[in-house]
Structures are given as structure tokens and as C-alpha cells.
Image (cartoon, helix red, strand yellow):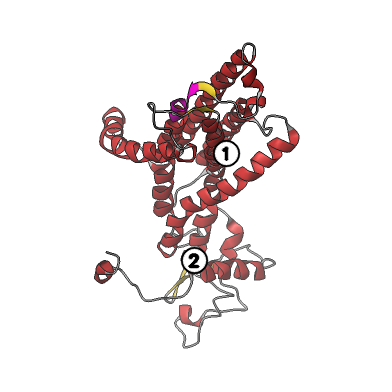
Amino acid sequence: MLVLGARYYRMPAPKGSPYTELARVVVAAVRKARVSVAGRLQYYVGDGTVADSGSDGAPSKRLGFLNRAAMITASEGTPDAAGGGGRRPSGWRLCTVQQVEDLKSLLGVLPLWSSGILISVSIGVMIGMVILQALAMNRSLGPRFNIPAGSITVCSLTAFIAATPVLERAAFPLWRRATGALPTPLQRVGLGHAVNVAGMVAAALVERRRLGMVRAHRGGTAGAEAPGWVAPMSALWLLIPLGVVGVGEALHFPGNMAFYYQEFPKTLRSTATAMAPLLIALGFYLSTVFVDVVRRVTAWLPGDINQGRLDNVYWALAVTATANFGYFLVCVSLYKSRK
């Protein structure tokens, strides 16, 4: 199928790496760090055009230091912009206003992007812990079948797949009827943050119930003290937190993809589609760091989870996710769209 679709691919001719263009802005701005910015300034727009400071073609005022990259200095001169026959200085010394604004767009998105890392951390921790929980719970479905513990995490993906069309076909149209507009990508991401917190709370409550059942059986059953003892609580209870987290992913990650694709310049559209998967990768790596820190600092995660306090781990994730949600709201309030 991949080969058969080759005729429909869009294959634009390579025009150099967009990251090189971004690096040029940084280098050019640093080279002009000591140049005075007092008085009337001119900025290079491109194609033999310049713009005065304060005009429509001038760069924006945010991250003003980077504007130096497009600033025309007396030592450089711009013969092509002035209509002469010379040539413009190297791109490592003078960049266009658009190149400067492209880098500003990327840097402006990074705080919002970073707010999604802890969501992936919480999901990564849950994916690992629910398998241990399933091993310590009753996984039987009927007299002859047991749910494989390793497959229990598929429920989160299933919830993601099931929630996506429901949100698109039912929830968001209702949102539009109530507010007059569909939710913006950032609103979807914000809802994803809130649902993720709810998922961590649900996970903590389910684990608290399981540990309560373990403690109740310790009083009258000697086997409850043995490592690996299975509580008579169905592993299907784990579907609740996994399902909630899956719904949160259906809100958060597509919203992120839409936001980055909308805000990134055209030259970085391929990078925009990679930003959300990068969140997942980084978050899952950091989830192992989180678990290691918990094991070193607390006694919540011993070798036998029946002897530990996994519910406290989930409560810690819920508190962290709540604080991260606040950080996200601050980033949203400070963010200025390029549109």
C-alpha cells in the first residue's frame, strides 16, 4: 500500500535544512550583540526590501535581541536592498525578518511544549505499575481464561481510539452549540491535563481499595503475608483509571499536534508533527527516573507491592500533574499566537 501511494506523495525539492536557517539567526544576533540599537533602524525583509523600525515589515518586539540578526548595520551595507549591483552579506551575518520570526515562533512554543512532559511521565509510570497491580489481582474471566497481565495496558489505547470519534462527532459539536465555536487546540490540551489528573486520582483510589482488601485478608489468612499473594479483587477495576487516562490522551496529544502545526512556520511543519511524539518518548524515559527516585527516597515501592504504598505514588503523580496544569495555564496566559 505504501508503494502504491507513491504517485500521490508530495515531494518538494530540497532547499536546505530549516535548522541551519535558525542557527544563522542566533549566530547573526550574537555577532551584533554590541551594536547600538538607538535611533532609526532598518531590517532586511528579503528580495531587495528593507523595513524601518515600527513599520509593518519590521520584526516583533518579543525576544528583541534576536531582531539584531535582521538589523542592517553601516559596516555591512545592503547593496541589493538599496538597488545597487553589490551582493548582500552572508546569511550568517544578516538574516531576513521572516527567519527571525520563525525562530521566535519555535522558542515561544517551547514552554507550552514542556508542560506536556509530566503528562507523559505520569502515563509512563502508570503503564508500568498497572502490570504489577494486575499480577497481584484476580485476572480470571470465567473458569478457563485469565487476562494476561502484560496486555492490560491495551485498555488505555482502546479508550484513546474509542474516545476520539466520540469527541469529534458528539462532544465537540455540543461544545460549539454552547460556546459558538469549536474548542481551540490549547483548550483541548487543557482538558487533557485535567482528565489526566482525574486518571491519577482514579488510579490512587483503585490501588487504595486493593491494598485495603490485602490488609483485610492479612488478619484471617496466612497466605496474605506471602510475597505475590493475589488479592480477590478483579483486575477489571484497572480499566477505570486506564480508560480515563486514555480519554485524556485523546484530548491532549491531538490537540498538541494541531497546535504545533498551526503555530510553527511552514519550513518547520515536519518538526511540528514530531513534537507530540517527542513528548511521549521524553516522558517515558523520565518516568523511569521518577520511579528510581521514589524507590530511593520512600518505601512505597518494595519488591512486593502488597507490602508497599503504590497508592501514594499515584497521589504524588496527581499532585504533580495538578501543579503542572497550573504551569500550563500560566504558559497559555503568556503565549502570543503568531496568527
Residue 273 visible (yes or no): yes
The amino acid type, in three-letter code, at marker 1 is Val
Q: Nearer the viewer, residue 62 or 334?
A: 334
Query: What is the quadrant of the N terminus in the image?
Result: bottom left
Quarter of the image where one finds residue 147:
top left
In percent of width and height, residue 170 lies at: 26, 32
Quarter of the image where one finds residue 167:
top left
Of all residues, the one furthest to the right in this rendering is 297
Q: Residues within 10 Å of mark 2 (few under 14, many from 20)?
A: many
Residue 193 magenta-highlighted: no
Residue 339 visible (yes or no): no
Q: Please state the extent of the stretch shown in magenta in the rendering.
A: 233-239
The amino acid type, in three-letter code, at marker 2 is Gln
Position of 226 relative to 132 (above/below): above
Tell me, for residue 125, which label it has, or none.
1
The residue lying at 69 percent from left, 36 percent from top is: 294
In percent of width and height, residue 9 lies at: 29, 68
Q: Nearer the viewer, residue 4 or 7?
A: 4
For discs 1 and 2, the disc positioned in front in the rendered view: 1
Using residue 72 as the reference point, say whether residue 167 is left or right of it: left
Magenta segment, prevailing SS (helix, strand or loop): helix
In percent of width and height, residue 255 lies at: 40, 44
- Residue placed under numbered mark 2 in the picture: 99
Of all residues, the one furthest to the top in this rendering is 220
Q: How many marks?
A: 2
Using residue 117 as the reference point, say whether residue 176 is left or right of it: left
Tell me, for residue 166, which label it has, or none.
none
Using residue 301 as the reference point, say whether residue 169 is left or right of it: left
The residue lying at 49 percent from left, 33 percent from top is: 196
Element type at mark 2? helix
Q: Earlier in the sequence, mark 1 or mark 2?
A: 2
Position of 77 relative to 32 (above/below): below
